[in-house]
Image: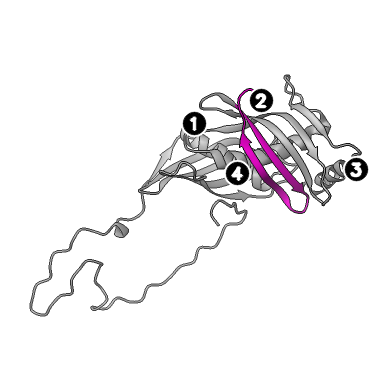
Amino acid sequence: MLGEGKEEEEEEGSVTAPPHTAASCCRAGDSPVEPGRPPRPPGPPSPMSQGPSPVLELPPSHSLPGRAAALAAAFIAWHRGTPGRGPALRALRRARRQDIDGVGHKYHLEFVLEDIFEKDSTVNCTAEVLYHLGNKNAAPDVQFTIEGKLKNTDEADNLFYNRIKSLKNELVAENIPDSYGNVPPEMEPIRALAWAASGYVIWKNSNENTKYQLAQIKHVKQVKRSDEYLEFDYMILLHENVSQEIIPWQMTVLWHPQHGIEVTQNSRQPKHV
């Protein structure tokens, strides 16, 4: 399914074509040769026979692949992030762009991820990001491969889950991090959960001319539930790097250590919120 990441490379299959015979060797648009008549000159090649679009190498410092890499990292954070793990882009190593006629622009990327908790915990990744032409409401297609293993966070995630479940009153917090960049240790999982959930919002709202990142949690409130899930209502600030705009965004997030993160509702808010 397009848009979903993959951790293991898929084996590419191959198909062997049957041997050509005199009767089966006509291209689309060619006419069969009649006995005693010279063959007609070949017509123009069909679009399918022109081969793949060329791939252009771009410097990693170029802004366009930088935006694509930031999007891929946000997408990975959504799929692989937990309260104990926050994948983030560390460095873009290689970038190539392919312009596909009538489809869009595809970026082939090689980059390094770090963890927002442990900057020295890194993994190499490859990704393909396809921005669609024409339809501004279509989220980019993202495919990724993580080379190696992300750190195991089962123990930390379960500790956080049990701590929140045992609270007598629902959790409420604001301004994470504060104006000095500080995050209280007990709020780190709340921040990591917002980091992962914001990856979904970033993916759904990105195009080739945007570069979003979570800047701050303005407010978060736990919502009481009768089932096994934890639910949080977040008001976050997204920083759009190209326009330098700070955008308030509301998102409702469900999480369970066995089922992962789900963003059930999200919406852009007026600036005064």
Q: Earlier in the sequence, mark 3 or mark 1?
A: 1
**Boundaries of the magenta span:** 247-272
Q: Earlier in the sequence, mark 1 or mark 4?
A: 1
Please state which of residues 162 and 253 is positioned toward the viewer in this rendering.
Answer: 253
Q: Residue furthest top?
A: 180
167 to the left or right of 120: right
Please state which of residues 49 and 91 is positioned toward the viewer in this rendering.
Answer: 49
- Residue 166 got which mark? 3
Q: In the rendered image, which residue does mark 1 sit on?
A: 61
Element type at mark 4: helix
Element type at mark 1: loop
Q: In the rendered image, which residue does mark 4 sit on?
A: 75
Residue type, numbered disc 1:
Ser
Rounded to the nearest whole Å, what is the CA distance between mark 1 and mark 4?
Answer: 21 Å
Rounded to the nearest whole Å, what is the CA distance between mark 4 and mark 3?
Answer: 31 Å
Q: In the rendered image, which residue does mark 2 sit on?
A: 273
Residue 106 magenta-highlighted: no
> Which tag is nearer the camera, tag 1 or tag 4?
4
Tell me residue 25's x, y (percent).
25, 73
